[in-house]
Amino acid sequence: MGWIRRTGIALIGLMAIAVLAAGCKWESNTAIDPKGDAERAAKKQEAREKALQGLPDFWQRLDANAGTDATYSVKVKMPDGSGGTEEIWISGLMRIDQERFRGALADTPKNMPGKKMGDIVEFNVNDVVDWWILRADGRTEGRHAGY
């Protein structure tokens, strides 16, 4: 009976370790699929370049169509709580001057302490990484990066 009990206790211990390990985040500096990571990075860069090429037209259309039923949004790099940046969608855009805009956070920030969806923020046009137009009929334009 003793070996059965010891085996059962060992199995319970191993199961507990497995459960704990499943909840831990494992980080490694070694990429599992370097080719896949490089391809994703290249596609992301290509999408950003396409979005940036369309920005001058986006700004003109925003200025010309203010007050229409279309929703104009931009994805912007905003300062986060760790000294880096967080990319987040902003809607309800209003021009402050040639370089600055104001709008409402259209997503819930992941790492921007004190900020929440709907908060009004200001940003520089140089921080825009993507744009999106949602028309009243449901058709969309932009959102090149798809994330």
Image (tube, grey):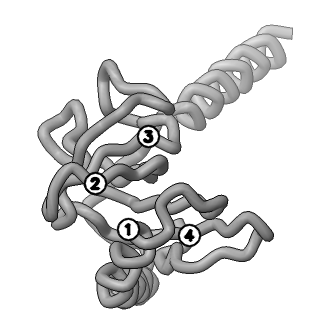
- Residue 19, given in percent of the width and then of the height, sits at 64, 29
Q: Helix, strand, or loop for circle 3?
A: strand
Which is closer to the viewer, label 3 or label 1? 1
- Mark 1 or mark 2: whose residue is earlier in sequence: 1
User: Outermost residue toward the right?
Assistant: 1
Quickly name the residue at label 3. Answer: 105
- Residue 133, given in percent of the width and then of the height, sits at 56, 69
Q: Is residue 41 at all visible to an observer of this figure?
A: no
Q: What number is the disc on residue 50?
A: none
Q: CA distance from mark 3 to mark 1?
A: 20 Å
Kind of residue at badge 2: Arg
Q: CA distance from mark 1 to mark 2?
A: 8 Å
Residue at x-position 37% and y-position 84%: 57
Quickly name the residue at label 4. Answer: 133
Q: Helix, strand, or loop for circle 1?
A: helix
Q: Are marks 3 and 1 in contact (CB under 8 Å)?
A: no
Residue at x-position 63% and y-position 66%: 134
Q: Are marks 1 and 2 in contact (CB under 8 Å)?
A: yes
Q: What number is the disc on residue 95?
A: 2
Which is closer to the viewer, label 2 or label 3? 2
Quickly name the residue at label 1. Answer: 63
